[in-house]
Structure formats: C-alpha cells, structure tokens
Amino acid sequence: MPARRLLLLAVPVVLVLGGLAVWLVYAAATGTGPSEQDVSALTGAIDARSDGLTGVVVALTTLGSTAAMAVLAIVAGLVLWARRRWVDGLFLIGTMATAAGVFTLVKNILDRPRPPVADRLLPVTNESLPSGHATMSVAVIGALVVLAWPVLTAGLRVAAVVVAGSWIAAVGVTRIYLGVHWFSDVLAGWATGAAWLAVCTTVLVLHRRRTAAVPAV
C-alpha cells in the first residue's frame, strides 16, 4: 500500500482515538460523563475486597506497573536491537518512553486528586489522571502485538488480541480495586495509551513503506 494511501487511512483512526482520549480526560477532570460512576465503582470495589483476592490483585498491579512495562519494553527492545531489528527496537522503546512522557505531562497539568487515603490499599504519591498503569499497559503490550502481527496467523492474531486485551483490562481493574484510581482515570488512561500507540504505529508503518519503496543501490 502506498504511503499516501496508508496515511489517509491512519489519520482518521488517530483522530478518533485522540478525540476519545481528550474527551475522557476532560470528563474525568470536570466530573462529567463516565466520571459520574467513579464513586459507585469505588464502592463496589471496596465491597468486593477479600484477603485472598487482594493478594492476587497486588501481584497483577505490580506486574502491570509503569516500571514493569518500562523494563519489558527496554529488554524486548534490546533483544530486537541485537537481532538487527533496529527500527522495531526503537519503536518499542520509543513508544514506551513517549507514552510515559504524555501521561506524566497530563497528570502534572491537571493535578487531579486520587481517591481518599482511607480507601487505598497501596501508598501512592503522584496525581491521579490519567492512570499510568492503564496508559502504559496499552502502549507497551499493544506495541508488542503490533510487532508480532505480520508473522502471526489469523488464529494467533485473534488470540494475541484477546490475551493482550484481557491483560490490559485486568491491570486497569486492579487500580480501581486497590482504591488508587478513579474509574474515569482508568478509562482515560486506556484511551490515552491507545491514541499514542496509534500515532507511533502510524510512524512505524509509514517508515517501513517508504524504506521498502527506496530502490537498492
């Protein structure tokens, strides 16, 4: 597919996901839309708590943390680099690093308070909106799926999407269960990660198309 045609297809996707992310961040910051369910979601999470379940949730949220996602991206990126897949390695690490920069910037600008300290099961110190766990899980796990996509069969593609989606959803839910994020923080984080992943993936695919179009010397 020519780069120009690909760009015409990618731009609407980026705009839709970007618009969704902006709206969800705005809604969370202003207490409108999905954020109207924040209190009820937190109350439901508190009611569902048990000692056994909390242990599992803490393990999941640790494995899906921003630090864990950063380590995963760096290690996988270095492996790709060692295999001379330099562009793929740069894409993975770059997507992770820039996604972290995006959600950190938004957090600092909006400075939304987290749920009450009495409702939290883990100590947290930074701002609430958007959820960094949600943003990074979509960006990093999604980037890994993007890189694996060309070599997967149709069945494996479905499996990859299901597994990745289930993991991303589980990590986001842990943040609500633990009382460290509002429901709307997580929704905004997912959307922010998806929008940024779409931007980075578009750049990657365009680079591949243009490189393939350059005749060998």
Image (spheres, rainbow, N blue to C red):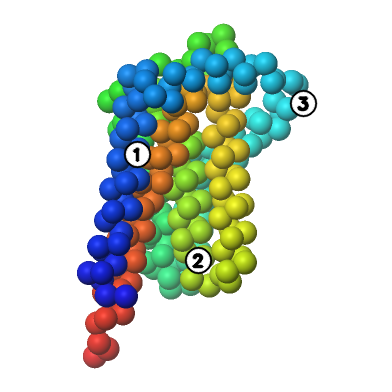
Q: Dot 2 surroundings within 10 Å: few (below 14), some, or many (20 or more)?
A: some
Residue sitting at x 24%, y 82%: 214
Up the image or down, 8 lies above or below 38; here it is: below
When asked about the image quadrant of residue 193, the answer is top left
Position of residue 5 in the picture relative to residue 85 (left or right): left
Q: Residue 187 carries which label?
A: none
Q: Going from the N terminus, do you reach mark 2 or mark 3 first?
A: 3
Task: Tell me if label 1 and label 2 are in contact, CB under 8 Å.
Answer: no
Q: In which quarter of the image is residue 64?
A: top right
Q: Which residue position is annotated with label 3?
A: 52
Q: Residue furthest right?
A: 52
Q: Which of marks 2 and 3 is in front?
A: 2
Question: x, y (%) of residue 24?
Answer: 37, 31
Mark 1 highlights which residue? 20
The answer to whether 18 is drawn above or below residue 43 in the figure is below
Residue at image position (35%, 38%) is 21
Circle 1 sits in a helix, a strand or a loop, which is it?
A: helix
Disc 3 residue type (three-letter):
Gly
Give the quadrant of the N terminus: bottom left
Q: Tell me the SS state at disc 2.
A: helix
Query: Which of the 4 image quarters holds residue 152?
Result: bottom right
Q: Which residue is drawn at 50% across and 44% down?
A: 137
Residue receiving disc 2: 149
Q: What residue type is labelled 2?
A: Trp
Task: Indicate the quadrant containing the C terminus: top left, top right, bottom left or bottom right.
Answer: bottom left
